[in-house]
Amino acid sequence: MPDGVTGIKSSLYINAPPVTVWKVLTDYNNIKRYIPRMVESDLVESKGDLKVVALTGEFRVFLFKKTIRVSVNMHETFPSRIDYEKISGDFDIYRGSWILQQYSSKGTLLTYESELKPSFIAPDFILQGILKNDLVNGLTALKTEAERLQVIDLDKSAGPQK
């Protein structure tokens, strides 16, 4: 990786089909409800499979507090992939992908890949710690939300019980 660029890749199994996981990933106005440290998430523009999303996160380490803003182009390929890249904000580089693969008959293997380089100064060991922690917490939150939606969808499709 070029100097100062951090690469991240992680995968996890979600007990919900790709279409349900897709609903969670593309609910841009509500990402702030379940992603830790995300304080704002807004769909700014929608042009078919291209979406513009504005995100604001707050990070605290010891006495250090930083608000980070970024606007991204989200290129959607339903229901298997979302590629994103920074338009503007607090990063020199901010790009990556969400890849959704059908796994078994009812699950999804979700893979997240990202490259980023902040435009602000942050010690590498602190940045690495925050990114690792946020990746684990963010993926866990997405998994929980998708599985919660899947249960709701299953309950609705079951209809009234006798």
Image (cartoon, grey):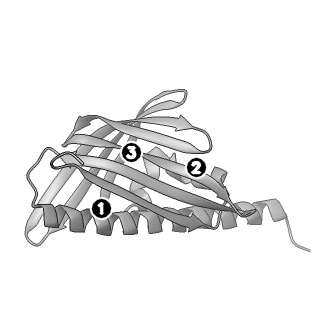
Residue indicated by mark 3: 96
Callout 3: few (<14), some (14-19), or many (20+) C-alpha neighbours within 10 Å?
A: many
Report the residue at 71% width, 60% height from top: 153
Q: Amino acid at mark 2?
A: Trp
**Residue 6: horizontal and vertical position, in percent?**
25, 53
Q: Amino acid at mark 3?
A: Gly
Report the residue at 54% width, 30% height from top: 49
Q: Nearer the viewer, mark 3 or mark 1?
A: 3
Marked residue nearer the N-terminal end (2 or 3): 2
Provide the secondary structure element on which disc 1 rests.
loop
Residue 37 is marked as: 1
Report the residue at 30% width, 53% height from top: 7
Task: State the image quarter where residue 45 is shown.
Answer: top left
Instruction: Judge left or right: residue 43 versus residue 94.
Output: right
Q: Amino acid at mark 1?
A: Arg
Report the residue at 75% width, 64% height from top: 154
**Residue 155: horizontal and vertical position, in percent?**
75, 66
Q: Nearer the viewer, mark 1 or mark 2?
A: 2
**Residue 44: horizontal and vertical position, in percent?**
39, 33
Callout 2: few (<14), some (14-19), or many (20+) C-alpha neighbours within 10 Å?
A: many
Marked residue nearer the N-terminal end (3 or 1): 1
Instruction: Judge left or right: residue 81 versus residue 152.
Output: left
Looking at the image, is 103 positioned above or below residue 72?
A: below
Provide the secondary structure element on which disc 3 rests.
strand
Residue indicated by mark 2: 22
Marked residue nearer the N-terminal end (1 or 2): 2
Task: State the image quarter where residue 159 is shown.
Answer: bottom right
